[in-house]
Image: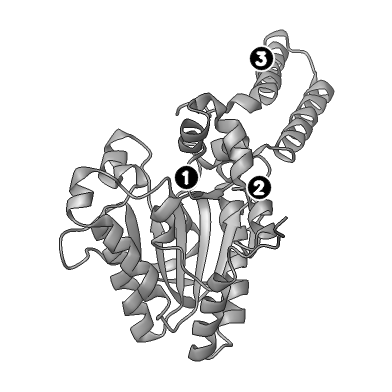
């Protein structure tokens, strides 16, 4: 089993954990009781982790959102749902593994769950194209949404992609058109849609499955029109300014709430979702069920109007002309 991956800002935690291991080894070798010191050291590690994660910058949250051990869509599906039946293919070209979906139950409630999927190693990353979907991925997602609409089953989407795939074959099969059609058609789906950004929410790749009545975001996820690196390369001509770009883009949960682009920030376990996947899944499940319960009390007409009003209200600002 490989050692846990430590992010740059977690250096103080990693240093304390190394000292803890050294102290435990010393205790065993010398047969000396240092239980009190060990207890204090563990408490200090937990406090340090709490302090660091309570004050993360936007760029540091981007790093957490990209953590290789962070739960992906299938991890959440396997943890918080039962009776999952995956549905494959777009009925036009092929099955895109960068987007997965199917019918499932969350605490006995039937849902259609659709999400971006990344890989854990080279083989699975190639299979999932590193979470960057081709046009057929978005066409598959729309096929599943329409199927859910036909049977009156609420839709849950889990978003975790740096963006749609922009390669030649993707352009040949009309990636922009596929995303645009999804944006249009999602406003005609008469059942509740709850969208959750669980990691990276990048550009049109996220929007392709991101039109819903409720937009939720995990505490250390981000939602942005462009990656901080891309923004830095354009505005500062240097990716070294990615941290500055992340702050300027206002891509974290609290900023999105202020801008009325998101409805709720879902708390993550201490140390991020990768530190405790079960707790992260429980928090996510509770938030989804809460919003579905509220939305399922609405009529079809109210669902459509609610979604329309939500997105029409985005981008409003107040100002004056001198």
Q: Looking at the image, is mark 1 or mark 3 earlier in the sequence?
A: 3
Gap in angstroms between the C-alphas marked 3 and 2: 29 Å
Q: Which residue is mark 3?
A: 25
Q: Looking at the image, is mark 2 or mark 1 earlier in the sequence?
A: 1
Look at discs 3 and 2 and give the one toward the viewer.
Answer: 2
Q: Quadrant of the C terminus?
A: bottom right
Circle 2 — which element?
loop
- Number of the label disc, if any, that sits on residue 269: 2
Query: Is 55 situated left or right of 78 in this image?
Result: right
Report which quarter residue 138 is drawn in: bottom left
| Callouts 3 and 2 close, C-beta under 8 Å | no
Look at discs 1 and 3 and give the one toward the viewer.
Answer: 1
Looking at the image, how many numbered discs can be counted on the residues? Answer: 3
Q: Which residue is mark 1?
A: 226
Count residues near mark 1 (Cα–Cα under 10 Å), then give few for <14, some for 14-19, many for 20+. Answer: some
Residue 85, visible in the rendered structure:
no
Query: Is 122 situated left or right of 71 in this image?
Result: left
Q: 312 or 192, which is in the foreground?
A: 312
Circle 1 — which element?
loop
Q: Position of residue 112 (x, y in %)?
A: 40, 72
State the residue at coordinates (82%, 26%).
40
Query: Is 174 situated left or right of 194 in this image?
Result: left
State the residue at coordinates (74%, 29%).
45
Q: Position of residue 218 (x, y in %)?
A: 59, 53
Residue 55, visible in the rendered structure:
yes
Circle 3 — which element?
helix
């Amino acid at each position: 089993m490989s050692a846990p991956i430590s992010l740059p800002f977690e250096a103080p935690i990693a240093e304390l954990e190394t000292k803890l291991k050294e102290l435990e080894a010393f205790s065993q070798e010398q047969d000396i009781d240092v239980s009190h010191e060990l207890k204090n050291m563990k408490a200090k590690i937990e406090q340090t982790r709490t302090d660091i994660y309570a004050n993360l910058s936007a760029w540091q949250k981007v790093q957490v959102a990209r953590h290789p051990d962070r739960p992906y869509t299938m991890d959440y599906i396997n943890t918080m749902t039962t009776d999952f039946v995956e549905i494959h293919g777009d009925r036009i070209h092929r099955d895109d593994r960068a987007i997965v979906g199917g019918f499932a139950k969350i605490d006995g409630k039937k849902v259609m769950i659709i999400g971006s999927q990344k890989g854990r190693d080279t083989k699975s990353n190639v299979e999932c194209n590193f979470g960057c979907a081709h046009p057929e991925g978005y066409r598959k997602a729309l096929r599943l949404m329409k199927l859910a609409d036909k049977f009156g089953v609420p839709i849950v989407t889990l978003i975790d992609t740096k963006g749609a795939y922009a390669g030649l074959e993707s352009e040949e099969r009309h990636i922009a058109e596929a995303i645009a059609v999804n944006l249009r058609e999602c406003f005609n789906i008469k059942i509740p849609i709850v969208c959750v950004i669980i990691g990276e929410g990048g550009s049109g790749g996220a929007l392709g499955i991101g039109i819903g009545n409720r937009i939720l975001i995990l505490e250390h996820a981000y939602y942005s029109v462009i990656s901080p690196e891309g923004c830095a390369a354009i505005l500062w001509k240097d990716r070294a300014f990615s941290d500055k770009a992340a702050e300027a883009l206002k891509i974290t949960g609290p900023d999105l709430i202020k801008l009325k682009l998101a409805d709720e920030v879902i708390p993550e376990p201490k140390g991020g979702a990768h530190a405790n996947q079960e707790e992260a899944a429980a928090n996510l499940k509770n938030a989804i069920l809460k919003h579905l319960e509220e939305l399922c009390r609405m009529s079809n007409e109210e669902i459509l109007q609610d979604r329309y009003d939500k997105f029409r209200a985005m981008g409003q600002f107040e100002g004056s002309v001198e």
